[in-house]
Image (cartoon, rainbow, N blue to C red):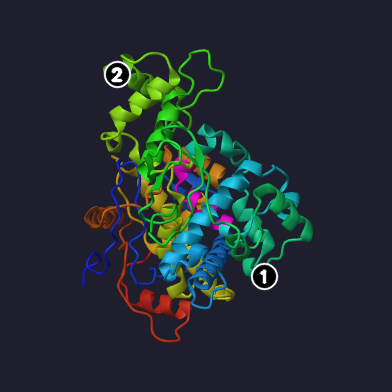
Amino acid sequence: MSQIDSLPPYDLAISETNLHVSPAPYNAVPPPSFTDIIPTYRIGSWTLDSPLVSVQQLKAHLTLLRAFKNLRLTVEGEGSRLPLACSVPLRGAQRWAWFVNLAVERFQRWAAAVQVKDLHHWLAEELPPLDVLMVWHAYMLNPTWYAEDCERLPLLRLLRVMRDKLLPAVMRMGDNPAYQPSEAREDSWLAQTDTPFDPLDAAACMFSRTIECPECCTSIEPPYLNQEGTGYAQHNFKQKCSKCEHEITKASLGTAKFVKDLMTDRSQTSAAKVYLAGTLHTPTNAKDTGRATRFKNGLLRLRQFQQYGLSKEGWKREIQHQLRHSMKTLIVSAYTDDRPFSVDLVGAVLRQGIFIDKMHEFGWTRPGFFDNREDEHVLEHAIARYHAFLDLMATSEEPLMLVPTLDIDLAWHSHQLKAGQYELDCKQYVGRYIDHDDKVAQDYLASSLDTTCRAWQKRYGVPYMYCGCPLPEESISERLRRFKHSMKEKPL
């Protein structure tokens, strides 16, 4: 069986740029063999004194993934105490998608109210509940969008100041399921978000979401769920405006969001500039305001937009009409609904479930799984391979679409949770910002994996991936020894 043939289907959409790299091919093969040689961390011309991520950080990340997995199992379980609005019957996966919609709403409310404090006080006074941590985690694993949104959106500017806090906070609090907030924190959370701290209790009081009609700007409150399947958290969302009778959909809300970003600060005297999503952050410049301004002004100079007067509402109506059928040719992925974020955070959380499931299947999220010092070498090896992965990107003559294996992806995800430092490290050691795209088409994924395997073999002289199945009750170190003895080449 070839390395590529061993991969399961991974049906996600393709990245638009070869400067980005794709997610791991999530197969059931454990990571490659461990070497007893002490690794050196080289990326391009740089030799690092210490790795970009540590074993303890990977362990903390795995603890967090275990908490996310357990939360999902609780929500999807038939015995769940979750109340369902309108008594709509939902199966496990549907119930989880609805719950994630509520989590995104709670994340948005928290982001608007969170305060910047030192880590000790932030952990006690500002740490959000597990469902909100889960959304923040998924957002940070879209590092280019997250970095740009933290610069572009007023809502997230406080997160920009403290965007390295997630991983240290997880390391400080230990086992997340056992974490209990103080009574003062529960009260402050309720004041911040108007929802209880406990995610399951919060679901009992979150039945509808306030939105603005794209046509007449009337505020309306569609339910998250209804019997017809057209609630805000359901796939076929639509809601008729009570005032103008316009049928509101996620697409029309996304178009209105785009129009608002385009129309805001048309005046050259505006103090705070508003940029279109996807135009501010480039692979080499984290805040290219010149490029973003040129892009926006170029759109506003289009002939079909210039014939309308200076009335903001007039421009808004006409631009919406012009873009209704061509929106997908623009920055469509960032304008899919009315939420301010450039990432569909519900979809991002759901996609991360695939990776979490694989970590769970390997047993890596099990408490104490890496307590043995010898077994801990697996994580050290993953970190060494991640640095080699970055080295491959830094030294390639032309940008490559590289596909990480699961062990590399764990280290890579952990690095991305150090958001500000991740940006600095990428720019310094690789020479550009590296995105993490989790929406890659299967055929492109397979082709890119083949490219990665050949580039790895050429640079390091060892195979990138190995086939082999773990024996029952076999320890990690025993598996690695078996892999090591089965190979003639010295592993990286």
Residue drawn at x 34%, y 26% is: 319
Question: The residue tagged with tag 1: helix, strand or loop?
Answer: helix
Q: Which residues are magenta?
A: 132-146
Evaluate if marks 1 and 2 touch, with contact meaning CB atoms under 8 Å apart.
no
- The image shows residue 474, relative to residue 491, as above or below, that is below
| Residue hosting label 2 | 302
Q: Position of residue 289 (x, y in %)?
A: 46, 24
Q: Quadrant of residue 180?
A: bottom right
Q: Is residue 205 left or right of residue 336?
A: right
Q: What amino acid does circle 2 point to? A: Leu
> For the view shown, which residue lies furthest in the bottom direction?
472
Q: Is residue 364 left or right of residue 113?
A: left
Q: Position of residue 396 (x, y in %)?
A: 31, 43
Answer whether residue 135 is magenta in the image.
yes
Q: Nearer the viewer, residue 290 or 424?
A: 290
Is residue 277 visible in the rendered image? The answer is no
> How many numbered discs?
2
Q: What amino acid does circle 1 point to? A: Ala
Q: Reading the chain from its start, which is encountered first: label 1 or label 2? A: 1
| Residue hosting label 1 | 178
Q: Residues within 10 Å of mark 2 (few under 14, many from 20)?
A: few
Q: Position of residue 299 (x, y in %)?
A: 34, 22
Q: Is the C terminus in the top left, top right, bottom left or bottom right quadrant?
A: bottom left
Answer whether residue 464 is magenta in the image.
no
Q: Position of residue 212 (x, y in %)?
A: 48, 38
Question: The residue tagged with tag 2: helix, strand or loop?
Answer: loop
Q: Is the N terminus in the top left, top right, bottom left or bottom right quadrant?
A: bottom left
Q: Nearer the viewer, residue 243 or 333?
A: 243
Tell us which disc is closer to us: 1 or 2: 2
